[in-house]
Amino acid sequence: MLVILAPTCTDAQRTHVIDAVRGTGCRVEESLVGERSLLSVLGDLDRLRRVPLEVFPGVQKVVPITPSYNLAGLEHQQEPTVVSVGNVRIGGGGFVVIAGPCAVEDGETLLKTARAVKEGGAHILRAGAWKPRTSPYSFRGLGLAGLRLLREVSREVGLPTVTEVMDPRHIEAVVSNADMIQIGTRNMSNFDLLVEVGRSGHPVMLKRGRSATIGDWMLAAEYILAQGNPRVVLCERGVRGFDSVTRNILDLSAVPAVRSRSHLPILVDPSHATGKAAFVPSMSRAACAAGADGVMVEVHIRPEAALSDAAQALQPPAFRDLCEDLQLLSQVIHPRADV
Ligand code: PEP
Ligand code: MN
């Protein structure tokens, strides 16, 4: 960390700053740049972060030179993290396809959709038992009953599952019935929930908050990692924009941006990003070309009967075609992949 002192900083103010830094156990090296003093601070910066140096009299600017996400960052680990979800590995090469309906609606629809996505080429089944809905009057999921259906279908078709948790009281049930916990966009900043899923030790898919910066998102991941749970996968799902032609703006540059900062795997969800089934195949291919570790897409056997997100659901034939494209594309993009 660098502390730039103001040209007007008095000797007493300078000493006060240096004493405060040393009081945390950190070392200070001072250099003069023209008229002003530059303090380079070395040591355990976590302790120093608790001292609000920027408001000390005589301080002009504090410049952090390491990101505040230690565990999620490349300084902590260079090799890519690989997260196992059932028998599927996410990260470190390969391209994973997660697919399924938005919500668990009933056993038969889920089973038929699960069979269709497995035949089409999906590796993991998705379906929400608890649905975060903008309106309290929309279908909000079957809850525990939905979770049980998800487990039955998962066993029947032989696909591991991911499902969203919104309430810490449901984490235990999700851990025993699903293979991966999803944290949705609306809960990326629900820090108590992040701590609890961190404590669970279960694989977590952390979706990007809809107005979160990459830095906010990485710090949200840090909450989970800091609980001793390294099994975190990021998922870009679009950020809020000004144009209603698409539901959100898919930020595909998040893929290289995350790669340049973190060892965590990154997926892309083109369904919630675009909100339109017709746009999902091209954006899935683009995600693969951008170097993502996989995609998550919504599929429904009869979108016209879907209880949520009908407009963005692919039908099984379109999903199968997409998987064929992704298989071909990922052989070029991830040559070592065994998709
Ligand atoms: C979902 O994937 O089911 C979902 C609700 O997505 P998001 O949190 O990205 O809106
Ligand atoms: Mn949905």
Image (cartoon, rainbow, N blue to C red):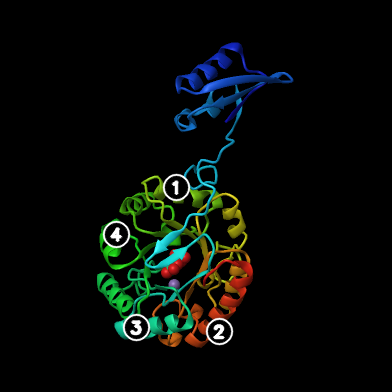
Q: Which residue is mark 2?
A: 321
Mark identifier at residue 222: 1
Which residue, given by chain and number where applicable, does mark 3 sit on? Answer: 111
Distance from the alpha carbon under mark 3 to that under mark 2:
20 Å
Q: Is residue 56 visible?
A: yes
Locate residue 87 relative to residue 91 in the image: left or right: left
State if disc 3 and disc 4 touch (CB < 8 Å): no
Disc 3: residue Cβ within 8 A of ligand 2's nearest atom = no
- Number of numbered callouts drawn: 4
Percent x, y of residue 171: 29, 59
Q: Are marks 2 and 1 in contact (CB under 8 Å)?
A: no
Viewer-side residue, 283 vs 86: 86
Secondary structure beneath disc 3? Answer: helix
Given the image, on which type of amino acid does mark 4 rest? Ile
Q: CA distance from mark 1 to mark 3?
A: 36 Å
Q: Identify the image quadrant of residue 1.
A: top right
- Residue 109 vertical placement versus 219 (above, below): below
Which mark, residue 27? none
Q: Dot 3: within a 10 Å radius of its alpha carbon, few (fewer than 14), some, or many (20 or more) residues?
A: many
